[in-house]
């Protein structure tokens, strides 16, 4: 069986360093909000070329706290896309704000920047671009629109650690950004973890307060504003510190696998996600498109190869978000993609022989 993702081979290679990281934390006497997290926040911020990082419990919490830091809530509108993971939208809704969807580009599968302006109203407070699959959105256009209309930008970087737009790393081009370190991610831990990133000291202080009950960092047990409980624990932070030292290698491996897929599937029936010439793709996912997607998925499964579909159900058509008032046909590109796209295994420890089998079987379809 060729699985879509597995951490087992990576764990075997890095086991000693992982154990050492856990041991350092256990001997430190501090398992919450200690030096491991503080160091990781600084190191990851430095990697992303951002001034401040605030570690939180998950990528979803990172989005939620980022939005709350900007005082986004009831009566506000946040422009984003329906072709994304549910957390993007659930975080917006959790603040009380309303997600306003625009369709995606049929080639890159990312937000169609040409549609953003027509969805801006007097209630629009923020644009939330999702750097999906490991590729950044067109940030030139988004920054121009945001500046023109005095809007915040919150980058959803859950899938894009290490990706770039021109020479700017994901997470460094906005008012505030959010990352996920879920195990499958480009920089993944062994549990839930996330981070809020910003260049504003004011927002950094506020985000730190929000992640811990509205209390001032290292202050008295006193709440100054309604806050939450969302802390990245020391063990995950120390593991992620080690993995951060290897992130360029992880991304290089992903790109090597992607290039082999591109070469192997050249001149076949499969259409690939287009990479914008200004983008540096870090390949969280390798996304393909075909009109007979479900047949391919089932065919590969019969051959003991597990693919993934990201995403099969557009968010605007899910029961949970019917109250937003959207209907089938509102976002034709997203809806078409939901019936055609699928992803091939691309985690860094995917054995070469397995990738060759995947390519061979797809060619035989």
Image (tube, rainbow, N blue to C red):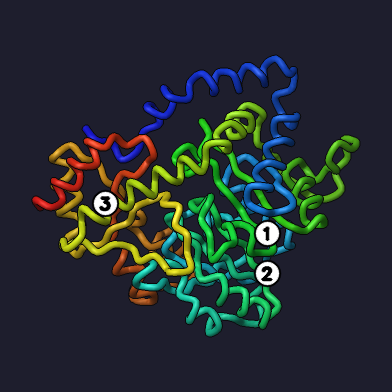
Residue 150 in picture, x, y percent from top left: 70, 78
Q: Residue at x 67, y 17 (%)?
A: 26
Mark 1 — residue? Answer: 176
Establish if 324 lies above or below 7. below
Q: Closer to the camera: disc 2 or disc 3?
A: 3
Residue 340 appears in the figure: no
Mark 2 — residue? Answer: 152
Horizontal placement of 264 versus 203: left or right?
left
Horizontal placement of 334 versus 270: left or right?
right
Q: Report which quarter residue 71 is drawn in.
A: bottom right
Q: Residue at x 41, y 71 (%)?
A: 104
Which corner quadrant holds the N terminus? Answer: top left
Residue 142 appears in the figure: yes
Decide which of 218, 284 is in the foreground and name it: 284
Inter-mark Cα distance, 3 to 1: 34 Å
Decide which of 35, 191 is in the foreground and name it: 35
Mark 3 — residue? Answer: 261
Q: Residue at x 41, y 52 (%)?
A: 283
Label annotation for residue 162? none
CB of mark 1 within 8 Å of CB of mark 2? yes
Q: Residue at x 52, y 41 (%)?
A: 247
Which secondary structure, mark 2?
A: strand
């Amino acid at each position: 069986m060729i699985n879509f993702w597995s951490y087992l081979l990576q764990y075997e290679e890095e086991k000693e360093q992982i154990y050492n990281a856990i041991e350092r934390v256990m001997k430190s006497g501090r398992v919450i909000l200690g030096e491991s997290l503080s160091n990781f926040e600084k190191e990851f911020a430095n990697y992303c070329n951002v001034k401040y990082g605030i570690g939180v419990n998950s990528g979803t919490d990172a989005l939620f706290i980022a939005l709350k830091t900007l005082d986004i809530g009831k009566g506000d509108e946040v422009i984003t896309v329906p072709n994304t993971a549910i957390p993007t939208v659930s975080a917006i809704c959790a603040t009380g704000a309303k997600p306003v969807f625009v369709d995606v580009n049929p080639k890159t599968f990312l937000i169609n920047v040409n549609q953003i302006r027509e969805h801006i109203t007097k209630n629009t407070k923020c644009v939330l671009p999702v750097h999906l699959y490991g590729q950044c959105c067109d940030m030139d256009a988004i920054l121009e629109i945001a500046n023109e209309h005095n809007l915040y930008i919150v980058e959803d970087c859950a899938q894009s650690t290490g990706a770039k737009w021109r020479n700017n790393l994901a997470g460094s081009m906005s008012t505030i950004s959010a990352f996920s370190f879920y195990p499958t991610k480009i920089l993944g831990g062994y549990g839930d973890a996330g981070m809020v990133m910003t260049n504003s000291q004011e927002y950094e202080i506020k985000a730190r307060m929000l992640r811990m009950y509205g209390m001032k960092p290292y202050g008295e047990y006193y709440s100054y504003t309604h806050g939450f409980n969302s802390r990245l624990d020391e063990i995950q932070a120390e593991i992620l510190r080690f993995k951060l030292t290897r992130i360029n290698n992880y991304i290089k491996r992903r790109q090597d696998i992607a290039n082999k897929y591109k070469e192997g599937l050249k001149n076949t029936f499969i259409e690939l996600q287009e990479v914008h010439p200004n983008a540096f793709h870090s390949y969280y996912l390798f996304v393909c498109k075909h009109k007979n997607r479900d047949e391919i998925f089932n065919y590969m499964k019969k051959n003991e190869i597990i693919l993934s579909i990201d995403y099969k159900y557009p968010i605007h058509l899910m029961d949970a978000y019917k109250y937003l008032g959207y209907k089938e046909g509102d976002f034709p590109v997203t809806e078409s993609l939901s019936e055609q796209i699928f992803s091939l295994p691309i985690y860094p420890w995917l054995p070469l022989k397995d990738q060759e089998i995947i390519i061979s079987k797809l060619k035989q379809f």
